[in-house]
Image (cartoon, helix red, strand yellow):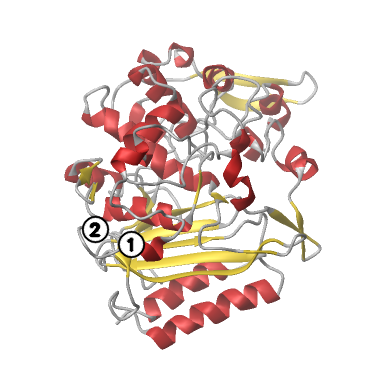
């Protein structure tokens, strides 16, 4: 969210995302309308209000922002509850959220910009861009007595397609079990950086750690998009965060999106909570140290050009993120600005790796994709895609219905079914 000079030139004629109701239908692919205009049934949207409020009343979440758009028309955009319970600060539609793994799709789009430029192809060896991945090892076991990994050499290299689909074998150290002590010893900042090292150093630390399996063999959720961020830096020459600002955030008018937040907007950032004995408590540094060592939830206050993590580091609003999704729904273009080509967007949402999730979904480029109806007990259409974030944020896009939906909370962990329920209620409200 750095205030680059060009921003004012690029977003002339666009309304500020903190007040999307000022958007007009003139020359815009994404604007505020009525539920009827968006093809939504007004009285059925009340069910979403009631479900969100019940989740707040039950202490599952402190507050929520939800947005639903169909055919580029925002038919539902509301804020509920509190952004900060202790200070009784109400949640606003303009509130800023740590979206964690919802950052991955944005980073994928950034990397695909370079893919379209011919900087690499999907079979390019990662080591050709980042030599630190030249000789990866696979963890076979962990010797608890010697406190060391038992490893073997890989049979084949990590390719770019493995990063995009989470099939590289690269792990998330914070989510490991076997060998966790060894993975943590490398002090990789794997989600929310403390800002004391560069992205280059962080990825070099990651490269010293063994893979979970042979590249391409299976699906393992890992720091693949963080590696993509470093690849963008090396291939393009700009710091990763600046590349994303200049190539995606500015052109799309995502005025409230970035890897850092200007000080004047710090009070708009929503407090994060955790659940302890069925009660909400602050997700403070003590909780961070326990759940996500070597990370800090205040990364967005510092200079993102030193380190920005593409897998989890973006802060944004529900409106900005929905606007980004609308670009993808429009096959790579929004308000006359083209970010990706149509066929590249089709690649992104193609079911590419089937050994993932349940029988009805496959992995696209860092998104789940609904690929068959036979085992799909959902109202979503075939070809729908989406993902979520660590702090209980989620989104999905349904190309057949021309539907975009975003729901933002800030709590982890939670046993709530709120986000899934909102999905059901959204489809129930379609005309």
**Measuring 35% from the left and 45% from the top, which residue is drawn there?**
353
Q: Is the residue marked by circle 1 packed among few (<14), some (14-19), or many (20+) residues within 10 Å?
A: some
Label 1 with label 2: CB-CB less than 8 Å: yes
- Residue under numbered circle 2: 28
Image coords of residue 380 (percent x, y): 35, 68
Image coords of residue 162 (percent x, y): 38, 32
Question: In this rendering, is residue 11 above or below 303?
Answer: below
Q: Earlier in the sequence, mark 1 or mark 2?
A: 1
Image coords of residue 421 (percent x, y): 51, 73
Out of 267 and 144, give the one closest to the viewer: 267
Quadrant of the image occupied by residue 143: top right
Q: Which mark is residue 176?
A: none
Q: Is residue 251 visible in this depiction of the protein?
A: no
Q: Is the residue marked by circle 2 packed among few (<14), some (14-19), or many (20+) residues within 10 Å?
A: some
As measured in the structure, the alpha-carbon distance from the residue carrying label 1 to the one carrying label 2 is 8 Å
Out of 215 and 42, give the one closest to the viewer: 42
Out of 183 and 334, give the one closest to the viewer: 334
Marks counted in the figure total 2
Instruction: Tell whether 341 sits left or right of 56.
Output: left
Q: Describe the element under mark 2 as helix, strand or loop.
A: loop
- Residue under numbered circle 1: 23
Instruction: Tell whether 136 sits left or right of 162.
Output: right
Q: Describe the element under mark 1 as helix, strand or loop.
A: loop
The quadrant the C terminus occupies is: bottom left
**Measuring 27% from the left and 55% from the top, which residue is drawn there?**
329
Instruction: Tell whether 75 sits left or right of 273.
Output: left
């Amino acid at each position: 969210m750095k205030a680059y000079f060009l921003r004012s030139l690029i977003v002339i004629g666009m309304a500020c995302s903190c007040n999307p109701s000022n958007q007009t239908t003139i020359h815009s692919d994404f604007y505020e309308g009525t539920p009827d205009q968006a093809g939504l049934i007004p009285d059925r949207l009340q069910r979403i209000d009631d479900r969100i409020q019940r989740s707040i009343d039950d202490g599952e979440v402190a507050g929520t922002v939800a947005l639903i758009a169909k055919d580029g028309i925002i038919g539902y955009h509301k804020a509920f509850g509190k952004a900060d319970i202790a200070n009784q600060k109400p949640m606003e539609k303009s509130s800023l959220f740590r979206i964690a793994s919802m950052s991955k799709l944005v980073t994928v789009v950034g990397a695909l910009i370079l893919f379209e430029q011919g900087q690499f192809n999907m079979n390019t060896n990662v080591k050709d861009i980042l030599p630190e991945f030249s000789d990866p090892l696979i963890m076979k076991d962990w010797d608890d007595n010697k406190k060391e990994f038992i490893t073997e050499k890989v049979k084949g290299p990590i390719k770019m397609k493995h990063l995009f689909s989470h099939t590289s074998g690269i792990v998330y150290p914070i989510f490991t079990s076997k060998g966790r002590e060894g993975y943590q010893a490398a002090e990789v900042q794997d989600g929310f950086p403390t800002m004391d090292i560069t992205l280059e150093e962080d990825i070099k630390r990651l490269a010293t750690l063994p893979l979970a399996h042979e590249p391409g063999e299976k699906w393992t959720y890992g720091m693949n998009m963080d590696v993509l961020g470093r690849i963008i830096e090396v291939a393009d020459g700009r710091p990763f965060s600046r590349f994303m600002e200049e190539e995606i955030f500015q052109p799309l008018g995502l005025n409230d999106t970035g890897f850092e937040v200007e000080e004047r907007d710090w009070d708009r950032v929503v407090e994060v909570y955790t659940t302890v004995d069925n009660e909400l408590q602050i997700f403070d540094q003590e909780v961070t140290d326990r759940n996500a060592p070597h990370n800090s939830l205040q990364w967005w206050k510092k200079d993102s050009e030193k380190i920005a993590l593409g897998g989890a580091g973006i802060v944004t609003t529900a409106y900005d993120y929905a606007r980004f999704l609308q670009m993808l729904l429009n096959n790579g273009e929004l308000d006359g600005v083209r970010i990706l080509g149509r066929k590249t967007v089709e690649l992104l949402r193609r079911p590419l790796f089937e050994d993932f999730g349940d029988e009805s979904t496959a992995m696209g480029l860092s998104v789940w994709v609904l690929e068959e109806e036979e085992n799909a007990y959902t109202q979503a259409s075939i070809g729908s895609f989406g993902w979520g974030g660590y702090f209980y944020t989620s989104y999905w896009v349904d190309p057949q219905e021309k539907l975009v939906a975003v729901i933002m909370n800030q709590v982890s962990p939670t046993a709530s079914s709120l986000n899934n329920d909102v999905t059901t209620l959204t489809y129930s409200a379609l005309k």
